Image: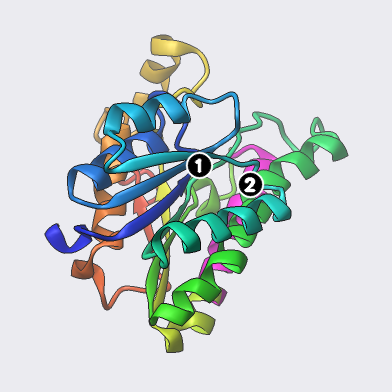
């Protein structure tokens, strides 16, 4: 995976301890990429970046629903590095409610973060990738974007949208050397899972392998899609769920 050495990466939602974004940032940095961690001001993003090391990581505070903040981030990346090779749209929120219980305000919030945030990332960084002749965009979907039954309504809706957006962007951006793929994690042991070990045990019983995934499992897939080893893969939706959606 030395193919990511020297590449510049932006990862949203990377400031949550124990989250997928943190694992992705650490793994890419260990493999030689320069990583820009992005998350809300109150996150642990700055501390995580400092732990990775100033020579490999930095933190930018950003609300993924804020278009002006995205423009500022693009300007900072352009000024600091002159390019962006990898964009991981990882930021997301969970809402454990069905269609009858979800309020309009709650629905909009989930869609704004999970869907609009992905759109804004692609919209503002794709031009920079186009200028340099290519790049890899990795959008975090979910098995909730592969199946509908039993899934929280707003969350599933937003993740199904991410699948469609990723496919459409992959087709549109392919002539410019930009690859776009969606990853679909299943049950991953992150702070997003509420209920602690008891809930994880319950969820593990629904998985054919009998065990939940770890953030590094997802990070390894991101590393592959970020690297030149996946140069002919675009427009794909890759489930990483131990056959839950099979």
Q: Nearer the viewer, residue 132 or 177?
A: 132
Q: Say which quadrant the N terminus sits in.
A: bottom left
The reply, left or right, for residue 19 in relation to residue 109 is left
Task: Identify the residue shown where x is 19% and y is 42%.
Answer: 30
Task: Identify the residue shown where x is 43% and y is 57%.
Answer: 80
Q: Is residue 53 above or below residue 155?
A: above
Residue 5, horizontal then vertical, whole percent? 19, 58
Q: Quadrant of residue 178?
A: bottom left
Q: Which mark is residue 1?
A: none
Circle 1 sits in a helix, a strand or a loop, which is it?
Answer: strand
The reply, left or right, for residue 102 in relation to residue 163 is right
The Cα atoms of the two marked residues, 2 and 1, are separated by 9 Å
Q: Nearer the viewer, residue 207 or 54?
A: 54
Q: Are marks 2 and 1 in contact (CB under 8 Å)?
A: yes
Whether 62 is among the magenta residues is no
Task: Identify the residue shown where x is 40% and y is 79%.
Answer: 132
Residue farthest along the left direction in this orientation:
2
Q: Is residue 213 visible?
A: no
Residue farthest along the bottom direction in this orientation:
175
What type of secondary structure mainly makes up the magenta span? helix
Residue denoted by label 1:
38
Circle 2 Cα neighbour tier, 10 Å, few/some/many (<14 / 14–19 / ≥20): many
Task: Identify the residue shown where x is 67% and y is 50%.
Answer: 69
Q: Is residue 32 visible?
A: yes
* Lower position in the chain sequence, tag 2 or tag 1: 1
Residue 23, horizontal then vertical, whole percent? 32, 36
Residue denoted by label 2:
64
The magenta stretch is 151-168
């Amino acid at each position: 995976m030395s193919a990511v050495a020297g590449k510049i990466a932006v990862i949203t939602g990377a400031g949550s301890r124990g989250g997928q974004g943190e694992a992705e940032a650490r793994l890419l940095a260990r493999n030689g990429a320069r990583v820009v961690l992005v998350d809300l001001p109150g996150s642990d993003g700055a501390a995580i970046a400092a732990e990775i090391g100033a020579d490999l990581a930095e933190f930018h505070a950003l609300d993924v629903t804020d278009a002006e903040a995205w423009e500022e981030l693009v300007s900072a990346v352009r000024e600091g590095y002159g390019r962006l090779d990898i964009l991981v749209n990882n930021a997301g929120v969970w809402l454990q409610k069905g269609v009858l219980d979800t309020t309009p305000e709650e629905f909009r919030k989930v869609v704004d973060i999970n869907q609009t945030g992905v759109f804004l990332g692609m919209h503002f960084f794709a031009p920079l990738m186009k200028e340099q002749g290519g790049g890899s965009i990795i959008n975090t979907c979910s098995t909730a974007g592969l199946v509908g039954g039993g899934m929280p309504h707003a969350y599933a809706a937003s993740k199904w949208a991410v699948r469609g957006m990723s496919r459409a962007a992959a087709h549109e951006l392919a002539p410019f050397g930009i690859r776009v793929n969606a990853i679909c994690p299943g049950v991953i042991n992150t702070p997003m899972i509420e209920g602690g070990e008891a809930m994880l045990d319950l969820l593990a019983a629904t998985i054919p392998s009998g065990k939940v995934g770890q953030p590094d499992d997802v990070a390894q897939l991101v590393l592959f899609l970020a690297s030149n080893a996946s140069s002919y893969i675009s427009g794909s939706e890759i489930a990483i769920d131990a056959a839950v959606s099979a």
